[in-house]
Image (cartoon, rainbow, N blue to C red):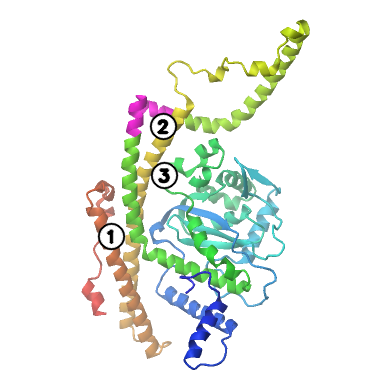
């Protein structure tokens, strides 16, 4: 019910349940506290059952073992009021998805102690709430101020933490440090990566144990980059990062759109209840993603193929219009990159030079006006409004203006990212298929082991049968998921619109193997 209607509270559900059961002769009221506790305990048992079957709830099969990108952002709608009833009991899912608050606080205090902590705001083309490092609370009536979430590029929730000080840089750094040992991550995506990455570099000077975090590459979310400074977009945007493909870095937003719908029901829950409810719904969200992952990857490949054909046509049209060669295009791309790298350094130098020259010009005008009659005097506005162009407004003969170079740069980057995306999707399809086969093989071997091993003294006969039945049922579900994924991926392979060379590598051992390691008849026999 919570997945279908996240905004429904436990009390509303119980009132509906009471109305229904009274109709059938039941009397008395349902205790909301007892019902909620029983529900979470039942969910905890289901989580243990999944753990027995070797199912990872917070790990993306398509991103294992190599994860291209992790997107981190805060959701400040998931706060909790201080006035909520207090309870000493710990969450049932403590540390499963939402990190332990003591661990987070210890990490933040350690970073702030070892580094020169300065309260302030970072500005890049505008004022961003996330671009700050402040240790003070922004809301006096709330306890937790929201969640900081880490999501892979397929929208699978990986980890989270409770925010107590707003969106400070130490929170995404904690998640980055937590995920780095588990996954081989290439890009770290943020809405303010241009501000966060210099901060991380400064922290690493005082905290050598965090040096490994710089092995990742900074990635400014593509849509947020449009609102940043122009040179910042060119330098940091994921659309211009080699190897990023069509990753947006905004994947956490779709998770926020789902989790924010339950914000009304978690504001007044206890600390343990809020933690357990958010963890439970995050697991259900991930399960839906796992079920639809094959369709999602195949559809993404089709869209990428179509978009690449369109971008290639647009690029050829632009080349013909400007009469450019490949060499000229590469020069334009490099000119834009060099401008983005040097513009920050040159900006202050140019401004200082303009101020100096303006002061000199005003001095010369004052001296000139003192030597001539008032009718012959010249004012500064008259000089600035003259029709004669300034030197930087004069385009040399045969030269190309910067706007044209930027247009070529954008077209070239779009084509490169789409070409990379096709190769990345093929790699993720292979990783997903290998993950399905590996999981089915583990369940099959374990099922055989449970059937053969009858010397388990610590288990009763009914317990042995229950475990064996559970494993075989999960194996059947996994085989069904394999069948659907195999059908989808073979359709992608056999589609004549796709360029099948991306599905074949030079090493024959890396080619796709859609064969099943155990026959369907063996599964049906179970």
- Give the Cα separation between the discs numbered 2 and 1: 37 Å
To which residue does mark 1 refer?
Answer: 488
Q: Is residue 312 above or below residue 219?
A: above
Q: Position of residue 312 (x, y in %)?
A: 33, 37
- Give the Cα separation between the discs numbered 3 and 2: 19 Å
Q: Which mark is residue 34?
A: none
To which residue does mark 3 refer?
Answer: 243
Q: Residue furthest right?
A: 370
* Quadrant position of the C terminus in the picture: bottom left
Mark closest to the chain's N terminus, 2 or 1: 2
Whether residue 298 is visible to the viewer of this picture, yes or no, is yes
Q: Residue at x 42, y 17 (%)?
A: 398
Classify mark 1: helix, strand or loop.
helix
Q: Is residue 339 above or below residue 526?
A: above
To which residue does mark 2 refer?
Answer: 408
Whether residue 220 is visible to the viewer of this picture, yes or no, is no
Q: Position of residue 354 (x, y in %)?
A: 65, 22
Q: Is residue 339 above or below residue 173?
A: above
């Amino acid at each position: 019910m919570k997945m279908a209607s996240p905004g429904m509270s436990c009390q509303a559900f119980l009132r509906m349940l009471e109305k229904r059961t009274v109709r059938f002769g039941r009397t008395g009221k349902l205790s909301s506290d007892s019902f909620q506790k029983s529900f979470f305990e039942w969910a905890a048992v289901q989580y243990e059952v999944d753990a027995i079957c070797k199912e990872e709830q917070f790990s993306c099969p398509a991103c294992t073992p190599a994860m291209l990108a992790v997107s981190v952002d805060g959701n400040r709608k998931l706060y909790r009021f201080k006035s909520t009833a207090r309870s000493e009991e710990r969450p049932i899912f403590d540390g499963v998805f939402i990190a332990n608050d003591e661990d987070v606080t210890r990490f933040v205090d350690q970073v702030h102690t070892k580094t020169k902590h300065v309260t302030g705001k970072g500005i890049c083309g505008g004022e961003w709430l996330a671009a700050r490092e402040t240790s003070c609370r922004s809301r006096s009536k709330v306890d937790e101020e929201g969640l900081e979430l880490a999501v892979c590029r397929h929208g699978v929730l990986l980890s989270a933490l409770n925010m107590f000080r707003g969106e400070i840089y130490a929170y995404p750094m904690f998640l980055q440090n937590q995920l780095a040992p588990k996954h081989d991550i290439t890009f770290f995506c943020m809405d303010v990566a241009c501000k966060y990455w210099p901060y991380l570099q400064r922290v690493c000077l005082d905290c050598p144990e965090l040096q490994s975090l710089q092995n990742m590459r900074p990635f400014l979310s593509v849509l947020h980059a449009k609102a940043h400074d122009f040179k910042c977009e060119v330098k940091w945007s994921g659309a211009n990062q080699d190897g990023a493909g069509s990753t947006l870095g905004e994947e956490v937003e779709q998770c926020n759109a789902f989790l924010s719908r339950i914000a009304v029901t978690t504001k007044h829950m206890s600390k343990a209840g809020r933690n357990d409810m958010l963890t439970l719904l995050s697991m259900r969200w991930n399960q839906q993603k796992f079920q639809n992952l094959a369709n999602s990857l195949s559809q993404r490949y089709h869209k990428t193929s179509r978009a690449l054909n369109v971008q290639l046509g647009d690029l050829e049209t632009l080349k013909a219009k400007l009469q450019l060669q490949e060499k000229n295009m590469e020069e334009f791309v490099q000119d834009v990159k060099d401008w983005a790298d040097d513009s920050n350094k040159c900006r202050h130098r140019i401004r200082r030079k303009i101020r100096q020259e303006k002061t000199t010009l005003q001095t010369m005008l004052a001296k000139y006006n003192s030597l001539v009659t008032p009718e012959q005097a010249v004012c500064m506005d008259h000089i600035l409004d003259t029709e004669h162009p300034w030197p930087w407004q004069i385009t040399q003969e045969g030269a190309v203006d910067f706007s044209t170079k930027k247009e070529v740069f954008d077209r070239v980057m779009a084509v490169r990212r789409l070409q990379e995306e096709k190769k990345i999707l093929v790699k993720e399809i292979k990783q997903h298929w290998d993950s399905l086969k590996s999981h089915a093989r583990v369940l099959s071997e374990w099922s055989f082991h449970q059937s053969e091993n009858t010397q388990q003294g610590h288990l009763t006969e009914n317990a042995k049968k229950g475990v064996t039945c559970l494993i075989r049922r999960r194996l059947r579900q996994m085989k069904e998921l394999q069948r659907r994924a195999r059908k989808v991926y073979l359709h992608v392979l056999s589609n004549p619109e796709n360029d099948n060379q991306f599905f074949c590598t030079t090493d024959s051992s890396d080619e796709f193997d859609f064969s099943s390691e155990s026959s369907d008849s063996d599964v049906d026999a179970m």
